[in-house]
Image: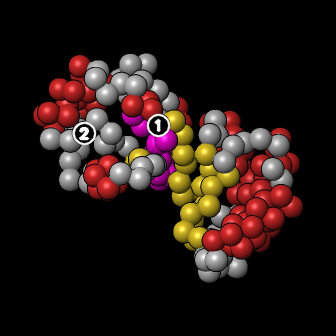
Amino acid sequence: MGYDQAKASIESSFKQTGLDYIDLYLIHAPYGGKEGRTGAWRALVEAQQAGKIRSLGVSNYGVHHLNELEAYIKELESQNGKGKGGEISVGQWELHPWLTRPDIVGWCQQRGVVCEAYCPIVRGERFEDPMLQSLTKKYGKTPAQGFVPLPKSVTPSRIKENADVSDFELSKDDMESLTTD
């Protein structure tokens, strides 16, 4: 995706939804080469500056893509002024105890970027894992509650579970027990 495609996609989002603004807009994947990625980012920044988008983010970017984007943001700021290059607010990746991605998570933590997990429960395939089950009992939670999840359910009880994650934190020992890398 490049600049023109991203602009068209943003406009299409508004036409399809009828919204006045969008809270969070992500570039789904780092396809299109450097020119495509930076062009797409520039389109998002322009939409944000026009008040159409509140926060920007990326999905499925590797650390080298994140470094490239960070350098491009600095370049935009040097051309247009401080704060005019956009800010990566959220990054979305497949994250779970069996795919922890410490390089990406560390990069984000150092910069205050929120990590949002898609497939935080490995598509439900690890619900019965003994370690995960012991922690669900210890904390009184379900196996689906962890990271900042990307909620994906039509079931009211699961939607409530997706929102009920801010009242606990796993201990360091419990986090280490889940690490499989």
Q: Is residue 172 above or below residue 150?
A: above
Q: Is residue 103 above or below residue 41?
A: above
For disc 2, the marked residue is 142
Q: CA distance from mark 2 to mark 1?
A: 15 Å
Residue 143 percent across, percent down from the top left? 28, 35
| In the image, residue 14 lies in the stretch drawn in magenta | no
Disc 1 is placed on an element classified as loop
Does any portion of residue 181 appear in the rendered image? yes
**Residue at screen point 72% across, 73% down:** 15
For disc 1, the marked residue is 119
Report the magenta residues as a range.
107-121
Residue 42 percent across, percent down from the top left? 77, 62
| In the image, residue 111 lies in the stretch drawn in magenta | yes
Q: How is the image coloured?
A: secondary structure
Give the residue type that dot 1 points to.
Cys
Does any portion of residue 84 appear in the rendered image? no
Crowd tier of the residue under label 1, counting other residues whose Cα lies within 10 Å: few below 14, some 14–19, many 20 or above? some
**Residue at screen point 85% across, 48% down:** 35
Give the residue type that dot 2 points to.
Thr
**Residue at screen point 38% across, 43% down:** 147
Residue 131 percent across, percent down from the top left? 24, 22
Crowd tier of the residue under label 2, counting other residues whose Cα lies within 10 Å: few below 14, some 14–19, many 20 or above? some
Is 82 in front, or is 55?
55
Disc 2 is placed on an element classified as loop
In the rendered image, the residue lying farthest to the front is 155
Is 58 in front, or is 141?
141
Residue 179 percent across, percent down from the top left? 35, 23
